[in-house]
Image (cartoon, rainbow, N blue to C red):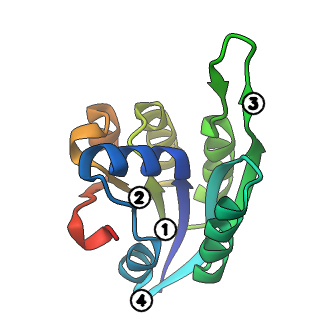
Amino acid sequence: MEKIAIFVDVQNIYYTTRQQFNQQFNYRAFWTKATANKEVVAAYAYAIDRGDAKQRGFQNALKNIGFQIKLKPYIQRKDGSAKGDWDVGITLDAIELAATVDKVILLSGDGDFDLLLHKAREAYQTKSVVYGVNALTAPSLINASDQFIAISHDLLM
């Protein structure tokens, strides 16, 4: 059975599906599709913690599906801008797990992750699948993946 590890850039998926489709991503439909006949070694959803009840409900729903949630605090800067991304955390976890799985599944459109996919392939011969919104996924990330799956209506709520 193929071993997989899943890494979800929650903020990226939320904003890109909202921008492109004005809908939310259906994590349960994704899970059903991505994990069929596969052994899930790890499944992480990386999010920013704003501490509200609606967000905690969403996080509990992800846990019930099978994800482990990793949270960072939301940081509001004095100039009004916000900080909170998981690029380094996702990369570190993915590189560590790439040595133990056949395939890394990444949900993000962020082109910064192209280096991660190249490294996983070069160091461990680990294949990769990227799920992202086609029009909002960096071409470098699509090209770095072994398979790109465009998020479409079958993966939306």
Which amino acid, mark 3?
A: Ile
SS for callout 4: loop
Instruction: Locate residue 103, reporting x and y percent.
Output: 46, 64
Which amino acid, mark 2?
A: Lys
Q: Earlier in the sequence, mark 4 or mark 3?
A: 4
Which of the numbered marks, if any, corresponds to residue 37? 4
The residue identified by callout 1 is 102
Q: Nearer the viewer, residue 22 or 115?
A: 22
Q: Are marks 1 and 2 in contact (CB under 8 Å)?
A: yes
Query: How many marks on residues?
Result: 4
Q: Earlier in the sequence, mark 3 or mark 1?
A: 3
SS for callout 1: loop
The residue identified by callout 3 is 75
On the question of residue 99 being in view, the answer is no
The residue identified by callout 2 is 127
Instruction: Locate residue 55, reporting x and y percent.
Output: 66, 60
Is 122 situated above or below 154? above
Instruction: Locate residue 6, reporting x and y percent.
Output: 53, 64
Q: Earlier in the sequence, mark 1 or mark 2?
A: 1
Asked where in the image residue 110 lies, by quadrant, the reply is: top left
103 horizontally vs 16: left or right = right
Which amino acid, mark 1?
A: Asp
81 horizontally vs 122: left or right = right
